[in-house]
Amino acid sequence: MSVSILVTLNSNYLHPLKVMLKSLFLQHPETPFAVYLLHSSIRPEELAELNRYIGGHGHELFAIRVESGYFAEAPVVKHYSKEMYYRILAFRFLPPELDKILYLDPDLLILNDIRPLYETELGGHLFAAAYHDRIPLTELNRLRLKAQELPAYYNSGVLLMNLRRQREAVREEEIFAYVKENKKRLILPDQDVLNALYSTSIRDLDEVRYNYDARFYRYYKLASGGKVDMDFVVRQTAILHFCGKRKPWLKNYSGPFHSLYKHYEKLAVPD
Amino acid sequence: MSVSILVTLNSNYLHPLKVMLKSLFLQHPETPFAVYLLHSSIRPEELAELNRYIGGHGHELFAIRVESGYFAEAPVVKHYSKEMYYRILAFRFLPPELDKILYLDPDLLILNDIRPLYETELGGHLFAAAYHDRIPLTELNRLRLKAQELPAYYNSGVLLMNLRRQREAVREEEIFAYVKENKKRLILPDQDVLNALYSTSIRDLDEVRYNYDARFYRYYKLASGGKVDMDFVVRQTAILHFCGKRKPWLKNYSGPFHSLYKHYEKLAVPD
């Protein structure tokens, strides 16, 4: 059975997207993937190249261009474009027969089977996501959004989406109203909106398995009493997330997963 | 054309051997390998398992058992067994029609094509090897072997062997005499013998390409003005060597190539 993947990005992220997809395809040699790309500015020749890449691996690309007239009425935040809404309102652009989809950021590596995640029972939940549980981050996030008294702060880089339920329950106007009111306080707008409006409708994912923050190797290892060591990550973690500003495809990155990232990057984009 | 590989080890290194071979096979999908294993104590069931492993990848294992009567007259050094001689005297046990072979330590990862190394013209040289060029190490080595005033100190973990020339020029008695005389000063006996007796007959290999010491990522990067960064290693270095006591298949290892090692280890030995 085919697995549906959603990505939303611009040309700057086509390179890491290929690396992420390469790792995804390699981990699932028997699974056909349907990759939906929601975008507004990727050039036709870039799409053709991506289509060849994905097709060459035996999978399918569905590129969906969101026309500029869309979200005319939506408020914008600082330097963020209206693309900030694509993730949370993706259900409006995806085929109506699609019941669920797995959204993936391009700054991920897939290290193990994601099908147990894809098969997670969503019930009435709108999303499944991992709560990033390091105290200092959480405190920071709570402070930033203190009015809402969030029960958790979910990372929006890996989102299993219950499209059927979203079509019933997610109200565009509510999102726009929230953004308008909180404009000045939003830092990562889509993630902030997700948490502020929907955190009680999100099913928890195990972050160590499905959204492991690559910056915190020592933290995970210590916090688990040594259990979550390099062996564990390489054999059990399905999704490794290169969160934060420093990215492994840019110069001067360093970290315990640097060599592993470069390995997949070489497989994805040989000389 | 088939490539001949030599390994000499005991049961304790069968696990890293599989990882090393996995990386070798993956880098050369079109090349058939003949793997010669020189040993004295590996059990038949372990050999059968290794044979299945190598055969399952489409390559051939030739296990050569050195009987205990051999080297009866050879001196021993500290806690080292007579297996210390297998590497330097391998030509005595290998098929006479074999003209050259590439010796590889089990604590290596093969990251890129080794055929340019294998095709290196040896001329009248007995070996090709990489000189490990970090000042502090060199000083240490010079001190240890100061009487010989070595022109270089070669690492014996990667050795291209000119078997034809060795059959003519390497004299067992000379080696035994040297070991007897220098017993107390030898630290890594086979490497010390190689350097003391044959360093003028060794052809230089580029260590960054063919014997990159995984402990010195920062050193190589700095010394090259940034050129030998992670991208370079992953795309250009053919042989990564986990030198020293701390090994990536043991607990509590850490280092920039830890995740990459664990990746190949998982491919070699799945759960």
Image: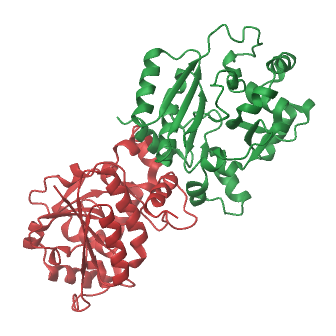
Chain colours: A green, B red
Which quadrant: the N terminus of chain B?
bottom left
Q: At 85% across and 38% down in the image, what residue appears?
A: A200
Relative to B37, residue B21 above or below: above
Q: At 22% across and 51% down in the image, what residue appears?
A: B115
Q: How many numbered marks appear?
A: 0
Q: In the rendered image, is residue B42 in sight?
A: no
Residue B83, given in percent of the width and then of the height, sits at 30, 81
Q: At 40% across and 45% down in the image, what residue appears?
A: B234
Give the left or right position of residue A42, taking residue B69 as reference.
right
Residue B261, given in percent of the width and then of the height, sits at 47, 57
Give the left or right position of residue B56, taking residue B202 as reference.
right
Q: In the rendered image, is residue A201 in sight?
A: yes
Q: At 82% across and 19% down in the image, what residue appears?
A: A179
Residue A168, given in percent of the width and then of the height, sits at 79, 27
> In front here: B61 or A161?
A161
Residue B99, given in percent of the width and then of the height, sits at 11, 65
Relative to A130, residue B102 above or below: below
Give the left or right position of residue A28, taking residue A70 as reference.
left
Q: Quadrant of residue B22?
A: bottom left
Relative to A161, residue B94 above or below: below
Outermost residue toward the front in this view:
A97
Q: Quadrant of residue A131?
A: top right
